[in-house]
Each structure stands twice: as structure tokens, then as C-alpha cells.
Image: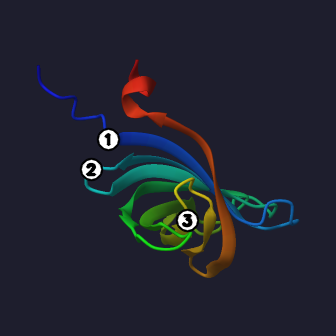
Amino acid sequence: MMANTFDSVRVITLTAGNQGMPGAPILTMALLIDGADGTVQGKGEISQAVAPPYGELRVSNITGQVRSMGFGPATQALALKGTIFTTLKPPAIGTMEIPFSAFFVTDNDWVGNGYFNYPPNDVTDVPIAPGVTLSAVAAAA
């Protein structure tokens, strides 16, 4: 019998930002993490109490790596990049592509700190915590 190639893949949701602070940008991500090689893929959303269309920004094509650090309470480093597409405000016509990047240091339970960036915004020293984590095999069943 052939081994299931999806056994090492996990689905995880992570939320980063100063929740409870009025106007703070909050990043929510749904990620597929392959524990075998550390690759990460997914999507996300940055929400903030600001005037439209900037109150909710969708982050597309999130890719990156998770690496084991092997020492202390911080056991994982998560480096990500992606793209935000936003419609220009009238009278301008078109769509603007904004690069997204993030870096977090967490424990084995995905609790930690880090930053995310989407120019001209640098959101630094924010907590990150998990939502639901599932095995990809269980999620597909």
C-alpha cells in the first residue's frame, strides 16, 4: 500500500495583530503547511476600521517557508510573501498591486510575535495566535 502524500500537510488559520485596539490592522490567514518540506501556501485578509476600500484587503497567493529553530520557547520561524490587489479611487482607473510580506516567530502551538508589511504600512511587534488546525486528509474527508 502506498503512503498518503498528504499526511504531513496541515491546514491552519492564524490571526496576527493587536486585537481590541481600535483601528489596528488585523491579519487573518488560512494556510496549508507541508511539514515534510516546510512549504506554506494560502490566502489572507487584512481588516481595519478605515474608510473603504481599505477596510478589508485580500492577500492573494501567500507563499513561504516555516523553519524549525530548535532552541528555547520560540521553536518556529514563519516567513511569508503575497500580493494585495486594490482598486484605485476615482477619478483614477485601474488596479494597484501591493506586495505583502510577514515574518513570525512562534512556539509549537503557533503562538508568538512578528510583523507584517504592505507598503506604506509596517505593522510591527504584533502577537500571532492560531485558529483551527486540521490535517489536510481529515479536512478532505
**Dot 1: element:** loop
Horizontal side of 22 relative to 16 (left or right) equals right
Relative depth, front residue between 84 and 11: 11
The answer, for residue 74, to whether it is visible in the render is yes
Q: Mark 3 points at which residue?
A: 106
Instruction: Judge whether 122 appears above or below 16 on screen.
Output: below
Q: Mark 2 points at which residue?
A: 36
The first of marks 3 and 2 along the sequence is: 2
The first of marks 3 and 1 along the sequence is: 1
The image's colour scheme reads: rainbow
Horizontal side of 139 relative to 105 (left or right) equals left
The quadrant holding residue 119 is bottom right
Q: How far apart are marks 3 and 1 (CA)?
A: 19 Å
Q: Tell me if label 1 and label 2 are in contact, CB under 8 Å.
A: yes
Amino acid type, label 2: Ala
Residue 124 location (% of width, % of height):
65, 79
**Dot 3: element:** strand
Residue 55 location (% of width, % of height):
73, 58
Amino acid type, label 1: Ser
**Dot 2: element:** loop
- Residue pictured at 83% horizontal, 67% vertical: 23
Q: Which mark is residue 8?
A: 1
